[in-house]
Image (cartoon, rainbow, N blue to C red):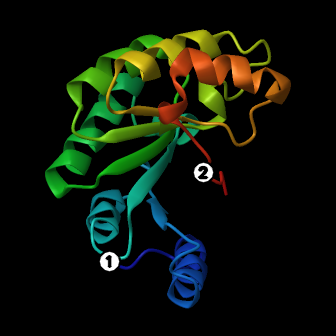
Amino acid sequence: RRPPRSTLFPYTTLFRSYQKFPSRFIPFGHIRPVDTHWESELERISEPPWKGLKLHEGELRKGGRDLKETTRMIFKKVEELGIPVVKIHLQNFRIVEELTREFSDTIWIFPHMGAYNDAQNKNVKQFCVLARVSKNVYLDFCGFAIYWQLPHWSQQAAFEYICVASDE
């Protein structure tokens, strides 16, 4: 079944932009596990030109009782379909640490240096250490609230694991 138009609008806009400027856009798809069509949408995202998936913790929480199991369910499908990159807002560091190891064939990108909705940026150090010791964890500094500390935290994570990825 085809998703409602409101769900498709960002994809069609992005796809047109990608067709016009393929060197400027790296298209990522988006799913919400609460939607009945999330698995078929994920299959669609696994085909070109899509390069990855974007997920939000708030939407993952609505997908089931257990945040970790909902996330695990999606990542099993992601690896099965061969989707190489997932940009994910996920703050529960215990879950992040466990699942990034379990799904090590997928590249995980954490926006805001792992400090999304974290006014004190308590998670930044943990995410930087995880990026340094993991081959599949990267940190995106777009929207990083304490930008003046970026040089310090980039060194903590290792510069090769820092990227710039629009959050929109």
Say which label, 1 or 2, has the lower sequence index: 1
Q: Measure how far apart labels 1 and 2 are at the Cα level.
A: 31 Å
Quick check: 110 left or right of 137?
right
Quick check: 50 left or right of 17?
left
Q: Position of residue 6 (x, y in %)?
A: 60, 74
Q: Quadrant of the N terminus?
A: bottom left
Work out whether residue 144 or residue 39 is closer to the camera in this orientation and state it. Answer: 144
Q: Position of residue 96 (x, y in %)?
A: 41, 21
In this rendering, the answer to whether 151 lies above or below 70 is above
Q: Position of residue 34 (x, y in %)?
A: 44, 49
Going 56% across and 87% down the picture, which residue do you hit? Answer: 16
Q: Secondary structure at mark 2?
A: loop
Q: Secondary structure at mark 1?
A: loop
Label annotation for residue 156: none
Residue 17 can be seen in this image? yes
Q: Amino acid at mark 1?
A: Arg
Residue 66 can be seen in this image? no
Going 62% across and 24% down the picture, which residue do you hit? Answer: 154
Q: Amino acid at mark 2?
A: Ala
In this rendering, the answer to whether 127 lies above or below 167 is above
Q: Disc 1 designates what residue? A: 1
Q: Disc 2 designates what residue? A: 165
Going 51% across and 76% down the picture, which residue do you hit? Answer: 4
Quick check: 109 left or right of 81?
right
Work out whether residue 164 or residue 87 is closer to the camera in this orientation and state it. Answer: 164
Q: Quadrant of the C terminus?
A: bottom right
